[in-house]
Amino acid sequence: MDASSTPDAVPGPPTGHAVPVVPAERASRARRLAAPALYLAAAGAAFTYVGTVDPNEPGHYPVCPLLRLTGILCPGCGGLRSAHAFAHGDLAAAFGSNALAVVGYFVFAGFMALWLVRAFRGGPVPRIVLRPAHWWAVGAVALVFAVVRNLSFGSALAP
């Protein structure tokens, strides 16, 4: 029987012949996939909890301290309601509660997909390396979002 016809074969060198997968390689792949799987399980558990325990009902979650003390919406205000709507597949309501959080959900999903693919193929763990200017830009976007959602013309961004 040819190695390329076995079900547990991976492409080999450029000669076109397949190389059988050995059990140690399977264990190594499982080890590489463990970290992203744990992160996905934690995120899934958090979304399951928030999807089950409605943040629109008073008393389930604490109120934002900045909102309670000053009446000003922070960039995270509405994030739990956004996650609840997102967990139920209601993207319009999720964007209405906190558009910045929804963007964060998609960035997280993209990063996790990249990490899983690289872990499966044996590539390096993806790193988010931002220069200080990029961090300042992220902070500026969050600040502008917080300011605009507290002004009358930006009330569409308020939860």
Image (spheres, helix red, strand yellow):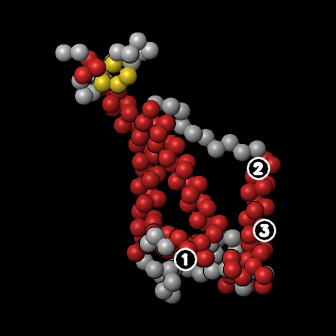
Query: Upstream in the sequence, badge 1 or badge 3?
Result: 1
Q: Which mark is residue 93?
A: 1
Q: Secondary structure at mark 1?
A: helix
Categorize mark 3 by other alpha carbons within 10 Å: few (<14), some (14-19), many (20+): few
Q: Position of residue 93 (x, y in %)?
A: 55, 76
Categorize mark 1 by other alpha carbons within 10 Å: few (<14), some (14-19), many (20+): some
Q: Is residue 57 above or below residue 29?
A: below
Residue at point 42% right, 15% down? 13
Give left or right: position of 107 versus 148: left
Residue at point 52% right, 43% down? 114
- Tell me which amino acid carries mark 3: Val
Whether residues under marks 3 and 2 lie with C-beta atoms below 8 angstroms apart, the answer is: no
Q: Is residue 67 above or below residue 140?
A: below
Outermost residue, bottom side: 58
Q: Which mark is residue 144?
A: 3
Q: Secondary structure at mark 2?
A: helix
Give left or right: position of 86 versus 155: left
- Tell me which amino acid carries mark 1: Ala
- Tell me which amino acid carries mark 2: His
Q: Does residue 65 show up?
A: no
Quadrant, the N terminus: top left
Q: CA distance from mark 1 to mark 2?
A: 29 Å
Residue at point 61% right, 61% down? 103
Give left or right: position of 1 versus 154: left
Quadrant, the C terminus: bottom right
Residue linked to disc 2: 134
Q: Position of residue 110 (x, y in %)?
A: 54, 50
Dividing the picture into quadrants, the one containing residue 152 is bottom right
Q: CA distance from mark 1 to mark 3?
A: 21 Å
Query: Upstream in the sequence, badge 3 or badge 2?
Result: 2
Dividing the picture into quadrants, the one containing residue 34 is top left
